[in-house]
């Protein structure tokens, strides 16, 4: 089995590893069917929120438009009306549905799932820290969001 070096700690992992087995960093090695890009590469760039609902209650469109997220190198930076929150990002594209974890600066983790639907990113996450990962893309007892690339940026960021 081929090996790959972790970009963070430099240790060697099997090429099928999505996260480094030693430090947890993304290895970027789970290539998707779309152009051979990894899911992390497809996520990188800036996204604008298209829709959001929490526990079945939709966020008004004027609020939705205030959200942007930038994903780069395992960091998820959420901007909302001048406020910024940074999360660590961990993907497991080998699971069905694909899994995503967001970890804040205090070490709290939100569990979610994600999928690509053409140029749209659909994410469903637990409604709060400590809640289980959703199994379906449904907003009952969860947060459901759809994002689209800003300015039509190509996958992999610009």
Image (spheres, rainbow, N blue to C red):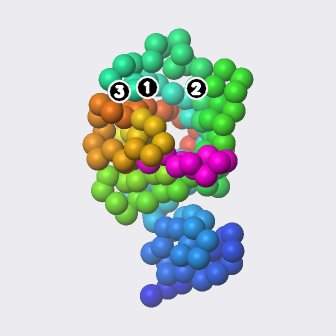
Quadrant where the image shows the C terminus: top right
**What's the distance in space between the residues labelled 1 and 3, CA to CA?**
10 Å
Across and down, in percent, residue 112 comes to: 42, 46
User: Residue at horizontal 45%, vertical 18%?
Assistant: 59
- Residue with the mark numbered 1: 52
Quadrant where the image shows the N terminus: bottom left
User: Residue at horizontal 56%, vertical 43%?
Assistant: 154
**What's the distance in space between the residues labelled 2 and 1, CA to CA?**
10 Å
Against 90, residue 137 (above or below) is above
Nearest-to-viewer mark from 1 and 3: 3
User: Looking at the image, is mark 2 or mark 3 earlier in the sequence?
Assistant: 3
User: Residue at horizontal 48%, vertical 57%?
Assistant: 91
Against 123, residue 29 (above or below) is below
Is 128 on the left or on the right of 70, as rendered?
A: left
- Residue with the mark numbered 2: 67
Q: Which mark is residue 55?
A: 3
Look at the image and give the residue range highlighted in magenta: 102-113
């Amino acid at each position: 089995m081929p090996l790959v070096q972790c970009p963070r700690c430099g240790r060697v992992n099997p090429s099928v590893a999505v996260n480094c087995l030693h430090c947890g960093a993304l290895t970027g090695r789970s290539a998707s069917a779309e152009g051979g890009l990894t899911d992390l590469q497809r996520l990188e760039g800036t996204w604008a929120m298209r829709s959001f609902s929490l526990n079945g209650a939709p966020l008004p469109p004027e609020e939705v438009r205030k959200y942007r997220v930038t994903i780069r190198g395992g960091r998820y930076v959420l901007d909302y009306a001048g406020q910024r929150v940074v999360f660590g990002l961990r993907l497991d594209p080998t699971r069905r549905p694909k899994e995503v974890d967001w970890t804040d600066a205090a070490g709290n983790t939100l569990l979610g799932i994600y999928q690509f639907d053409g140029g749209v990113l659909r994410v469903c996450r637990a409604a709060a820290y400590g809640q289980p990962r959703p199994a379906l893309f449904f907003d009952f007892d969860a947060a459901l969001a759809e994002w689209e690339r800003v300015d039509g940026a190509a996958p992999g960021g610009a």
